[in-house]
Amino acid sequence: MANDRRPAGGVSGRRPSAVLGMVLGGWALVAAGTAPATAHPDGHGHGRETSYVALGDSYTSGPGIPAQVDAGCARSDHNYPSLVAARGQVTGFTDVSCGGATTAEMWQPQGGNGPQLDALGRDTDLVTVQIGGNDVGFGSVIGTCARLAAQDPSGNPCERSYKASGYDRLALAVARTAPKVDRVLRAVHARAPHARVVVVGYPDLLPDDGSGCFPQVPFAAGDFPYLRDTEKRLNLMLRLVAAVNRAEYVDTYGPTVGHDMCKAPADRWIEPLQPASPAAPAHPNAKGEAAMAQAVAARLDRGHSRD
């Protein structure tokens, strides 16, 4: 329990290196065409998810989506945790997701909001966790790539910038985030030892075929596939870290392909940098949150049969 009280960057020892090695090994397996094994849940909480706690960042909280119920955290009552809870299978629901959260905010206050992990207890039956995007630096990446696009709109200036040192700084950022997510999941298990823990991946932000849509999304043409692959790498890392921590993983990328921020307003579930529907830029709108809720609900239902 001692590590449970430390912030995400403050745990030393062999575990972070082991998790990093696991993630790198998992990438190699996928590159070779061998999918890593998926961990089965340990059985706790099956059929009795009565106390549900949602942890996460802005992709969980739903900034801009009506109705906003917590201005400080940009939290909507129509985000995916609220929609999952509304299915009627929970009797106690606590949503502490907060826009801008990193793994560090699991242990430390964020504005006027307490540490997210404090919402957990021994009576918690279900926990969903969606975290890591801000640790990698989603916001700064978008700003950097948009700025560099003006220099070479048909090339890949953002990719060249992040690889200028001879290695991919975004791939490294994803790898360095793995031990942080690992510590979060270990802390969740420590505080809610009987809970079913579900890690939620990030939805499809850019066209899966690598095509672009400048200026609607102001990235250079060659940077769209690079950023798509970076998000896929992040989601793979989350799936691998979930597996090693006896947690389930929910893929929200696959179910949202074809509804990225390049699509027409009626078809997209992720808003571009100038939203047409109530949502934050480069974030899910109400349809996107509903799609993630459906994916989470489907995973919860499948889990009862232990498939």
Image: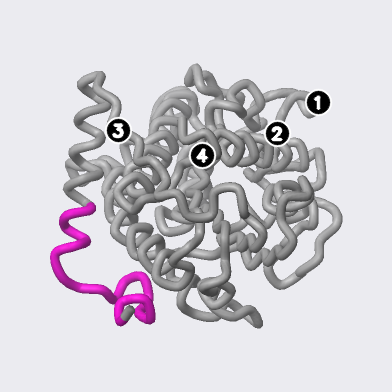
Tell me where residue 180 appears, x and y as whole percent: 34, 62
The kind of residue on which mark 3 rests is Ala
Q: Earlier in the sequence, mark 1 or mark 4?
A: 4
Residue 55 forms part of the magenta stretch: no
Tell me where residue 85 appears, x and y as whole percent: 73, 52
The kind of residue on which mark 4 rests is Val
**Extreme residue in the right direction:** 67
Question: Relative to residue 5, is residue 71 depicted above or below?
Answer: above
At horizontal 55% and vertical 24% (from top left) the residue drawn is: 207
Tag shown at residue 269: 2
Residue bearing the label numbered 1? 266
The kind of residue on which mark 2 rests is Trp
Query: Which mark lies nearer to you, 1 or 4?
Result: 4
Q: Within 10 Å of the Cα at label 3, are there few (<14), some (14-19), or many (20+) other Cα atoms?
A: few
Tag shown at residue 37: 3
At horizontal 61% and vertical 60% (from top left) the residue drawn is: 54
